[in-house]
Image: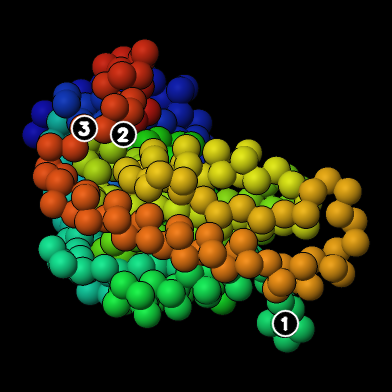
Amino acid sequence: MEFIKACSVKELPEGAQKIVECGAQKVALFHFNKEITAIGNACLHKAGPLGLGAVTKKDDGHYVACPWHGWEYNIKTGAAPPGYEDKQAVYEVKIDGDDILISTLPVQKAHRAMHDMSAIEDLMKLKYETTPTSKNILGISTTNMNDDLPRYSTSEAALETALEYAAEKHGAATKMLKLRELGFRACEGYYSQHMNACTWPCSITEMEPNDGMTQVYRDMILWADIILVATPIRWGNASSLYFKMAERLNCVQNQITLKDKVLVKNKVASFIITGGQDNIQAVAGQMMVFFTDLGFTFPPFSFLGWSRGWTAEDMDKNVLQFKKSEYVKRTAKELVDNCVDTLQSIKHMDASKLKAPKPHKEDSLSFGMDNPDMNV
Ligand code: FES
């Protein structure tokens, strides 16, 4: 067995950890419990840097938690916690005078066990449910309320009008998702550590398939031909639930950055924006920018807006005024007509030829620059 110098003993005092190069591999060195150990640095999940993870003592030894999504490995045996079959590569460690040496080859090879992902297999394999003739219209209501004290929502009411009309007039299959009923975790910012840490399906969805965003991914990406997103105006912006959903859709956009892969194919998006006061155009602009970045197409006149203006502090009159509005009833229908017309014209577009003129990872100024801690 050949050995190479990893670092000096002084560089790795008790309680320290370090990433070192071992040929083409990176190895995570640990000094805990008076013992120096070495395991592969690349997490078996998505290659997160184990040498940067937090080490904690458990009943059967010390474990390092991957800083990206928390997979754990025993720092001596490389084994995942009891119940999991994964094993990280283990390297032999020797002390030679002031130097720490590690074997150039692992004494135990890494083993990535099969994980049961059947609950989200349709998302992983991108099993699209759209067909050449489908007209699947997904309404997404982003307003929030206490369902024990339900109140009338103007944005949701306009969305219901639009969906009813879509089914009646165009024979569309319709679905409504109310974000407040789904219960989903906010984006936890894995992207901020490394672009590869933001995965499709979302890392949170992998960890927790019952998270409510699973339904949004399924319906928006696999099922819908058209999406209608409805939001109230809150402090001049779309609702907080809208932004919570948008942040979790980073994993859709990130596929373009990482793999030049557009998941949203031949789909139309439009918006319903209502508020007691105003800022409709700014909200519509923000939503359009976001959804065009995902790959959606817009019809001409792609949003319905309704508000009563800056001085409309008499909020109690909103619903009365809204219900009387013939304008809303008409434009909800016109919005649907425009979406369906646009869908007909893009339905047979060859999405494989679609270019995504967005930054890819190669466009980063530091692309190709080595980061000694990262495996990817
Ligand atoms: S847990 Fe390590 S990369 Fe995901």
Between residues 156 and 66, which one lies in front from this camera angle? 156
**SS at mark 3 in the image:** loop
Residue wearing tag 2: 257
The label number, if any, that marks residue 355 in the structure image = 3
The label number, if any, that marks residue 210 in the structure image = none
Residue wearing tag 1: 150
Between residues 31 and 358, which one lies in front from this camera angle? 358
**SS at mark 1 in the image:** loop
Q: In percent of the image, x 46 and y 23: which residue is there? A: 11
Q: Quadrant of the C terminus?
A: top left
> Looking at the picture, does residue 177 appear above or below residue 123?
below
Amino acid type at mark 1:
Pro
Q: Is residue 285 left or right of residue 85?
A: right
Q: Which comes before the other along the chain, label 2 or label 3?
A: 2
Amino acid type at mark 3:
Lys
Q: Is mark 2 within 8 Å of ligand 1?
A: no
> Looking at the picture, does residue 178 appear above or below residue 142?
below
Between residues 226 and 107, which one lies in front from this camera angle? 226
Give percent across and percent down for residue 249.
43, 51
